[in-house]
Image (cartoon, rainbow, N blue to C red):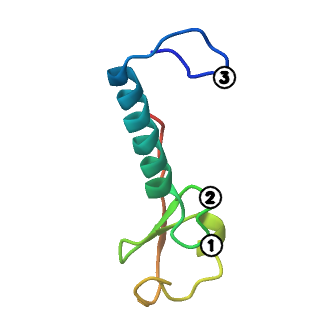
Amino acid sequence: MGEIRQGSTRQFSVMELNRWITMQAENQQMRFFLSCRICRQNRISCVFQCGHLTCRSCSEPLVNCSICGTPITDRYSIYLHPP
């Protein structure tokens, strides 16, 4: 599927445009899902024993989970690779 560029002479069918819009929405949704629940800037890279996720930077100062309040006794690194 081609890119949409200003001034492009390529014609896009309605089906191609709908597919492109759907893919963009899914991409945005995935970025949101993979972002830190606290800062929303960094990728998640840490999970607490309660199961909540943050980036390493946001996890460091926490004593209790900022989402559920559970005392943090362990931090586990997680590694997410792009598909």
Q: Quadrant of the N terminus?
A: top left
- Against 59, is 20 above or below? above
| Residue carrying label 3 | 6
Q: Earlier in the sequence, mark 1 or mark 3?
A: 3
Label 1 with label 2: CB-CB less than 8 Å: yes
Residue name at image x 51 percent, y 15 percent: 2
Residue name at image x 36 percent, y 28 percent: 19
Residue name at image x 67 percent, y 17 percent: 7
- Against 83, is 55 above or below? below
When asked about the image quadrant of residue 22, the answer is top left
Q: Is residue 3 left or right of residue 41?
A: left
- Against 77, is 37 above or below? below
Count of residue discs: 3
When asked about the image quadrant of residue 61, the answer is bottom right
Residue 56 at x, y = what percent?
61, 65
| Residue carrying label 2 | 42
Residue 9 at x, y = what percent?
59, 9
| Residue carrying label 1 | 58
Label 1 with label 3: CB-CB less than 8 Å: no
Q: Dot 1 lies on which element?
A: helix
